[in-house]
Amino acid sequence: MNKLWSVAFLTFKEGLKHRILYCVFIVALLAMTLSVLISGFFMRDISKIILDFCLATISIGGLLVPFFLGITLLAGDIDKRTVVTILSRDISRPQYILGKYIGISLLTGMIMAFFFAATIIAIQGGILLYGEHYFKSYSLLAVFSSTLLNYFGISILNAVVVLWCSITTTSFLATLLTLATYLVGHLMDDVVRFIESPPPGILISMPLQKTVQATQYIFPNLAAFDHKLSAAHGIPIPFIQFSVLTSYAGVYIVAVLSLSIVLFTRRDLC
Amino acid sequence: MQGFFYVPMIKIKHLVFDNVKKTYTADLGKKKTALTGLTLSVLEGEVFGIVGPNGAGKSTALKILTGFIRPSQGKVTICGHSPQISSSLKKVGYLPENPCLYEHLTLQDHLSFAGQLAGYSKEKTRERSNNLLELVQLDKSGNQSIRRFSKGMTQRAALAYALFHEPEILILDEPMSGLDPVGRKLVIDIINNYNQQGNTVLFCSHILTDVERICDRIGIMHQGQLACVLKGEELGGANELESIFLKTVSMGVQ
Amino acid sequence: MLKKFSFLFLFCTAFALNAVLVQPVKEIRGIYLQETYTRIGTLPSNLLQAFSLEFQGATADLLFLQTMTFMGYNIGENVLPEQDEWQLIGNTLDRITDLDPRFWDPYVFAEMFIGWQIRDFELVNNLLLKASKARIEDYRPFYYLGFNHFYFQKNATQAAFFLREAAKRPRAPSFIKALASRMSLYGSQTIAGIVFLEEMISETYDLILKQQLKTRLTALQRIHELEKTVLHYRKKHQRLPEKLEDLIREGMIKNIPSDPYGGKFILLKNGKVYTTSDLRVSSEKK
């Protein structure tokens, strides 16, 4: 357990030293400030506008980890053979995979927590600037639970990154596969619904229907973790739904990480 | 001493290769053989050097020994355990061919990570770090990112990292590459000193003179096998190793 | 040395040229801006939703911002978009509210411009019905629907139905109930308009739009004043004045106020005051 945390902490520390992180922090903070100012162009849904942009920024900030940092920290680790530094010690490969995953999850959590705090400040700034009248629908609980669900969704994606990086040899391929997973994860649900009840006049062949339906058991349903819209309108997600989604994320992450461990332990490194 | 009173001492075999074969699947499904039945054992407390031409399988052998690669056939053990079990690496320090430290972290970061893994207290970690930094003459660069290190500095830094947890077995892949004569002398001194404390060293190198200077036994590898093993004291004259080496390689195995 | 400076010089020249070209490039983009905007309105909603991934809220906001930019300068210059452009705006508002059905601004925008200005109530009422489904707790969609039926479409039965629905919602102001019962009185129309605009103004932040609403309110208030004076005249003389000028002659008003929309106030046979501008921005075409 101790070793797990050592690896996680090393990964976290390495992630923090990447300069891209600081660029993004600055850009994101600018975007959030701008969102407060832009919201003044709108007529009355000012709190919604600020939250829309801020929650989108939180999401993008979080997605930065699976798409860039996570890939660098995992695929780069194997690419540049820095993995030797860790695995030449008495650290087993499962410990390595889990430690790395915890490390990038911590990184994601830190980035999103930082942006969440910035969002709260942006809202306070908006209240100061435009008056409380336009912030009647603002609900901290809704914003918090949506951000938490967003974090769980990105954690799933992080686990998928671990899987792709433990199979592929190049960062580029891992990025591509992660992007594909992200897109499928967001669009799959709509496509499945469309296939299951097609509009009249459209015939869908049985094999296609079965294939599409099968994808939802393989790929993660990331769209289900997107509650930014209702959060921006101040509607918190019911607790039951929240817990079902949380368990789904937990189960999916455990499954993906287990598979990664199985594949990674069989792999020749270097 | 042993010369006068010849007592057959049973030395423990620390590292054992038993008919190890390794075949890679290269691009387009072509098979590439790196090891064709390596049998070798390194005894406790000795310095064993592996020499061999490029592509002889030296690095592959060391990677199998540290568990990064699984052998296709045969058995490898470290103190009787398979390297695939991570705890058997507890007593092993490994210096890879191209030192692979994290560029963005400092040497101090690496050493404190090693300290955490070894279960050292903070005090002990600090003390050991300071000693090692002094030993590899990097005491002024401990807080610099590895990225700013020169090749030689990185090599020495990686050596410090490999030595941190006071391993009983040291496995070094080309420890002298990229070092100037001063650095080479430093590394040789470290290895010698380390061996005098009763520890085992296995390393491979291109530089035959260095190997001659420090090894108890020398194995010449060729085409994925051990061609012959020489004892350090048997090599008397200058360049003797080189002539044997060249002869072995030109003859081929068997 | 020379080389170093020559590149610096090249940079300066190129940068200066770039600055010169910014405006022409902007103009070219301006030509195509409308085309892009047109295309958004023709995209199927589900495709738009798919494109915006998990950023539907922000996409809706940006599209709406674009719509307002499209309108904004026109408002400032008292120029109105063409009929087909209104159709376009209507389409885009529909897409925006598909992306985020609870987004209230587009509905208000539709009410203010497509409703008050263009009087295309089929479009507006459809949008408002969508709003009433998405914002179940909100009284405003039904209130607006009721208002449109009452004030513009003169369909008292429908209006009463919608206003009663609105009054049922939590936090509905009490005047809605009163409005629903008093609706048979034709005279309350102007007051209803004033109340409606006052409520809109109080909730609008955007300064230009607020000014728009205030102009409209001023016009309605002037009509209301005139109608009140006409009632006063009738009480005194037991008959309606023939023209508004009669009121001046009687000394009841000093002069006939001007219509901020540039029209002329006319007294109708039933005692109501009408303006030739019909409270719309005069349809100067671009």
Image (tube, grey):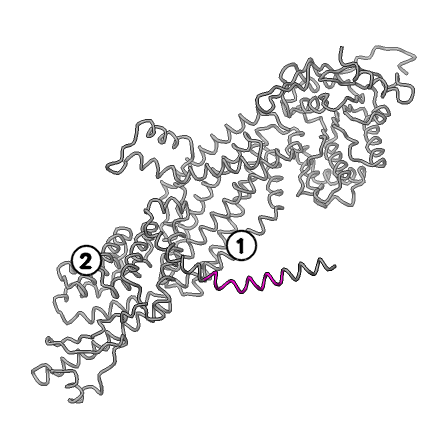
For label 1, the residue is: A27
Q: Is residue C23 magenta?
A: yes
**Quick one: quadrant of the C terminus of chain C?**
bottom left
Q: Residues within 10 Å of mark 2 (few under 14, many from 20)?
A: many
Q: Amino acid at mark 1?
A: Val
For label 2, the residue is: C162
Image location of residue A100, percent across then percent down: 57, 36
Q: Quadrant of residue B35?
A: top right
Q: Majority secondary structure of the magenta segment?
A: helix
Image location of residue A50, percent across then percent down: 43, 57
The residue that appears at 81% across and 40% down in the rendered structure is B137
In the image, residue C75 sits, relative to residue A269, either above or below, namely: below
Q: Secondary structure at mark 2?
A: helix
In the image, residue B237 sits, relative to residue A159, either above or below, namely: above
The residue that appears at 79% across and 16% down in the rendered structure is B250
Instruction: Indicate left or right for B112 with C140 as reference.
Output: right
In the image, residue B73 sits, relative to residue C212, either above or below, namely: above
Q: Amino acid at mark 2?
A: Phe
Q: Residues within 10 Å of mark 1 (few under 14, many from 20)?
A: some
In the image, residue C43 sits, relative to residue B222, either above or below, namely: below
Instruction: Indicate left or right for C82 with A80 as reference.
Output: left
Q: Pick the residue in front: C267 or A238.
A: C267
Question: Subunit of mark 2?
Answer: C
The residue that appears at 86% across and 19% down in the rendered structure is B243
**Quick one: quadrant of the N terminus of chain C?**
bottom right
Question: Subunit of mark 1?
Answer: A
Q: Which of the numbered marks, if any, corresponds to residue C59? A: none
Identify the residue at the far left of this view.
C238
Image location of residue C203, percent across then percent down: 33, 65
Magenta residue span: C11-26
